[in-house]
Every structure is written in C-alpha cells, then in structure tokens.
Image (spheres, grey):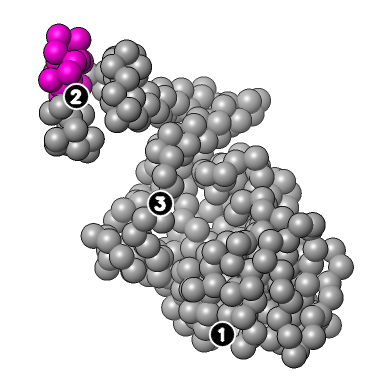
Amino acid sequence: MSEIAYTPTTVPPVARPTATIAAAITAPAAAPPAVSIVIPAYNAARYIGEALDSVLAQTFADYEIIVVNDGSPDTVELECALEPYRGQVRYLVQENGGPGSARNTAFKAARGRYLALLDADDVWEPEYLAVQVSMLERDPTLDVVYSDGIIFGDGPDVGRKLMEAFPSHGAVTFESVVRAECTVLICAVARREAIINVGMFDETLRAAEDFDLWLRVIQGGGRIAYHRQPLARYRRVQGSRSSDPIKPYEQVLRVFEKASQTPTLTASERETLRGENDRFRALLRLAEGQQALARRDVRAAIDGLSEANTYFRKSKLRLALVLLRLAPQLFLRVYGMRGRRTAV
C-alpha cells in the first residue's frame, strides 16, 4: 500500500472517502519497530487524542502508531484532532468496511513483529506495552496476551474491572473461549505472524469478529494467555451500543457455524459448540420475541418466546406465553407499562 504525506499547512477536506486511499502523517522510519499499534477510527475525533496521548506515555517506546480512518463521517474533525501528532502517526484512509476491515488494513501496513490493538476511544496505562511485550518475549510459545482493564466513561459499570464483566478463568482453550469461561479482551498484543497466518479478521462479520479471530488462532495451534493487571481503560458511552439487539446473536451463530467446519475438532469440542449454538439460538429467538412484542405482533412474539422457552424453561416465560395466548391485549398493555426488560 502506497503512502503519501499531506502538506503541513492544510488538513485535507475529505468528508467521506470515495475510494480506498492511504495517507501518512509521516513516512515510516527505516528500522522496523517491535510493535505496530493498530487504531481503527470511526466517529472517533472526540476521543482519539486521549488514546494517542496514552500511547505516547508508554514506558516501552519501540513502536509505530497506525490510525485507519474507516470511511468516517467525521473525517475533517478526525484529521484536525490528528494534526498535533504529525510525525508520530501513520494515517490510512479507506472506504467504510467495519472495524475488522480497518484493522486488517493496518495489519497489512504494519512493520512490527507484534500487533497491539487499541480502540480509538480507549486508553492504556503507561506500563501496558512493557508488560505485554515482556510476556511474549519471555515465552516464545505464546502468541497472544491480553490484560484486565477498568471500565470508565458513562453508565453503571464505571469503575468495574473488565474481567468482572467478561471473566477469564483457567487456561485459554477452544472450549473455554466458546463457553465464555475465558473472554479474550480487545486489550491484546499478538505476534504478527499468528494473526496473518489465520487470515486476519473476517471482514464479513460486523460483530463478534474478534471472537472469531481468537477461535481461529487457537484452532491453528496458537497459545493465548492473560494476566489480571488492569493496564487498559475501556470507555463506555451511553447510547453507543448497537440499536439492533438481534445482530450480535446472529453473528455469534455465524462464528459457531464457521468453527464447526474445522475437521480437526475433537468430539468434546464439537459437543461444546453444539451446546453453545443451542443456547445462542434460544437467546436469538428470545430477542426476536421481545422485538415482536415491542411492535405488538402477537403471533411472532409467541413463536419466538415459545422456541426460547424450549431451551430456558423458565416460569416467567411460560407465564408470558399463557397470557399472550389467553389475553394478548392485556399482556401487551402490561408489557408496555413495565418495559421489555422486566416483562419477559
């Protein structure tokens, strides 16, 4: 991928990229760095300065920073926010393809032997890279290392550790990741070849793409480890979660389907996949039933909740189904008054 430097006196007036291009705030140095820090940016102008400041404060200094503008509608504001970091950041622009695509673009341009993933609205503690890289250097059999972090920003989870919300217990194996006993967090540093060798992120996934990647790393023989030192801060922004409650379940089910095609899976791994596939399909049908209730579609709600109940077998679901069949209008009124989160 070619790189060009834009002039230091103006910010390019690119509001919406119409073609895949690459522009670098600075030309890469002659000697390759140890670490390539990968930052996808979409509507990130407000926060990216904090992320970059946390990188520049690292005690480990052998790195390059690659920011990929993923066809962001705030391109002008983003490039203004990046202006103070001229000479310190490699800046690439592409048409919108999602976070997996943006990270892949950075991976292809990366020169470091390690890849460090950072979201544009998150920040690192000063020892983040030093600790993660040290673990990889000490144990050449490790391919990926991730740390704990602290949730900050907005919402009830502020101050909570990530591993309290998304736990990791025991060894990171295919089965422990599928069952969410180990959640490989985005606060990760990986050997570049471990990511490249499994084909990088699946760009057709717009959710669960990291889950898919880590499963493929493990299936390819890679080793993943973690530690509990909270070296990152993960930002929660009110209202930033997906407005589509169905999509995450659909994407996880796609990941399970992909993983099930691997011929080397053991019988135990296949059984784990089947069990989690059944659970997520029930969660999907529950979410679809709740959506049907919200639009007052009684027949679709009964279908979704009935299928979910064959898995969960909860008294609350059974009661909801009885009321929907016997007194649907009364149930819909109560449901609307109490809200979806408490009614089913």
Q: Is residue 290 above or below residue 77?
A: above
Q: Is residue 265 above or below residue 154?
A: above
Q: Nearer the viewer, mark 2 or mark 1?
A: 2
Where residue 186 sits in the image (x, y, percent)?
A: 50, 58
Specify the segment rendered in magenta. Answer: 316-332
Label 2: few (<14), some (14–19) or many (≥20) C-alpha neighbours in 10 Å: many
Q: Quadrant of the C terminus?
A: top left
Residue 308 appearing in the image: no
Looking at the image, which is closer to me, 202 or 10? 10
* 3D distance between C-alphas at marks 2 and 3: 26 Å
Please give left or right for residue 107 compared with residue 237 in the image.
right
Secondary-structure class at tag 2: helix
Which residue position is annotated with label 3? 241
**Within the image, what quadrant is residue 63 found in?**
bottom right
Secondary-structure class at tag 1: helix
Where residue 170 sits in the image (x, y, percent)?
A: 38, 49
Residue at the image point whose x is 79% and y is 81% from the top = 6
**Within the image, what quadrant is residue 18 found in?**
bottom right
Q: Earlier in the sequence, mark 2 or mark 3?
A: 3
Label 1: few (<14), some (14–19) or many (≥20) C-alpha neighbours in 10 Å: some
Looking at the image, which is closer to me, 237 or 87? 237
* 3D distance between C-alphas at marks 3 and 1: 29 Å
Residue at the image point whose x is 27% and y is 61% from the top = 155
* Mark drawn on residue 332: 2
Please give left or right for residue 81 compared with residue 161 in the image.
right
Q: Earlier in the sequence, mark 3 or mark 1?
A: 1
Which residue position is annotated with label 1? 56
**Within the image, what quadrant is residue 13 found in?**
bottom right
